[in-house]
Image (cartoon, grey):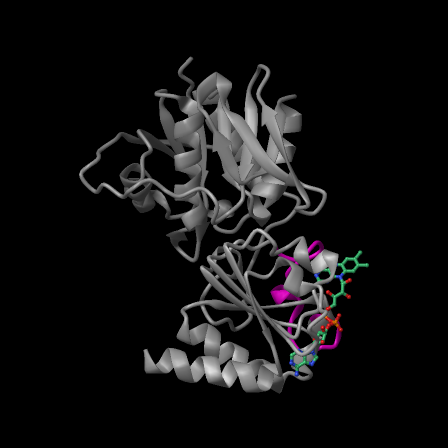
Amino acid sequence: MAKKVLVLGEVRDGALRNVSYEAIAAAKKIADGGEIVGALIGDGISQLANSLIAYGADRVVTVEHPHLKSYTSDGFSQALLAVLDQENPQAIVFGHTSLGKDLSPKIASRLQSGLISDVTEIEGSGDSALFIRPIYSGKAFEKVKIKDGVVFVTIRPNNIAPLEKDESRSGDVSSITVDIQNLRTIIKEVVRKASTGVDLSEAKVVVAGGRGVKSEEGFEPLRELANLLGGAVGASRGACDAEYCDYSLQIGQTGKVVTPDLYIAAGISGAIQHLAGMSNSKVIVAINKDPEANIFKVADYGIVGDLFEVIPMLIQEFKAL
Ligand code: FAD
């Protein structure tokens, strides 16, 4: 049976995050020919509606308010509840991002609905859709089916390919006015740390360093390689604990989960907690001095050697291409 599915577009720095388009592709499978409604919540975001339509949304509903400029649980909940009240969708899809992980369970429990989180693949469509999600830190996958009722779904970035962009698509864009009130927190200012610009969670290439990098300066060649490949730098907790880099780079069970096309692990032993955050990467290259290092068990390509010799060689080779 065709379903009406709502997709929450996620905006960062004035642009839609790629996972929003991936969520539309997931929604299409769930909808099985039904309507896809995009939702945009923020301040000054309505001009992004056409982008959601170009990637497959049939129409878009926006909620704008000065208090929605930055994400707060309270503010976005009030806005999304108003959209759901108007639209009554049978499924709601979010990115499995910090925002999606915070907002989806809150609203799902408020509406006494089910939630299928961290979906990496959808087999089939409509009522027979099977949602595939990793469990036990990525050691196994489970297949979940919707029995009945409204369902909330979060999808892991970089796993479900977006549909082809079609700028000729058109659709209605409407707005809902919501009086955002009784906020327990109001964000006055967001002060960002300097970053390379590529979002680690959505990067197609990740060059990650571990304790083997040995110092803050030791990350420089990794940064150079990542820049060369248009990727982002990540790290093991070992490297973060040793203060070689910021915890925002940590990948693993208690850090970020990444699924890039290429993951280069340099000086990382491959502890189970690290593997939980990267083992689903499409191609894994491990560089380690120790031929017995556990990381080689998940690597597609292994280089036994000193990272301070291997990485400059890789940089040289890529520069020569
Ligand atoms: P090490 O295990 O010390 O490995 C360093 C590696 O570098 C070695 O294999 C060594 O052979 C190699 N090496 C050294 N010098 C060189 C060189 N010059 N060239 C090449 N190779 C070299 N860890 C995470 O990463 N992410 C998490 O989210 C996470 N969550 C955790 C949660 C819990 C509850 C617990 C208990 C632990 C968690 N950990 C996590 C920590 C995890 O168990 C490991 O301690 C950590 O991943 C080790 O980091 P590492 O591989 O950088 O360091």
Q: Tell me the residue at 38%/53% (across/down).
A: 15
Q: Nearer the viewer, residue 171 or 234?
A: 234
Residue 56 placement: quadrant: top left
Q: Position of residue 164 (x, y in %)?
A: 28, 42
Is 132 placed left or right of 69 in the picture?
Answer: right
Residue at the far left: name it: 168
Tell me if residue 294 comes above or below residue 94 in the rendering.
below
Residue 217 placement: quadrant: bottom right
Is the magenta region chiefly helix, strand or loop? loop
Q: Quadrant of the N terminus?
A: top left
Report the magenta residues as a range: 240-256
Q: Is residue 304 visible?
A: yes
Q: Nearer the viewer, residue 302 or 168?
A: 302
Q: Nearer the viewer, residue 143 or 184?
A: 143
Report if residue 8 lies within the magenta region: no
Q: Tell me the residue at 66%/44% (across/down).
A: 184
Q: Nearer the viewer, residue 128 or 69?
A: 128
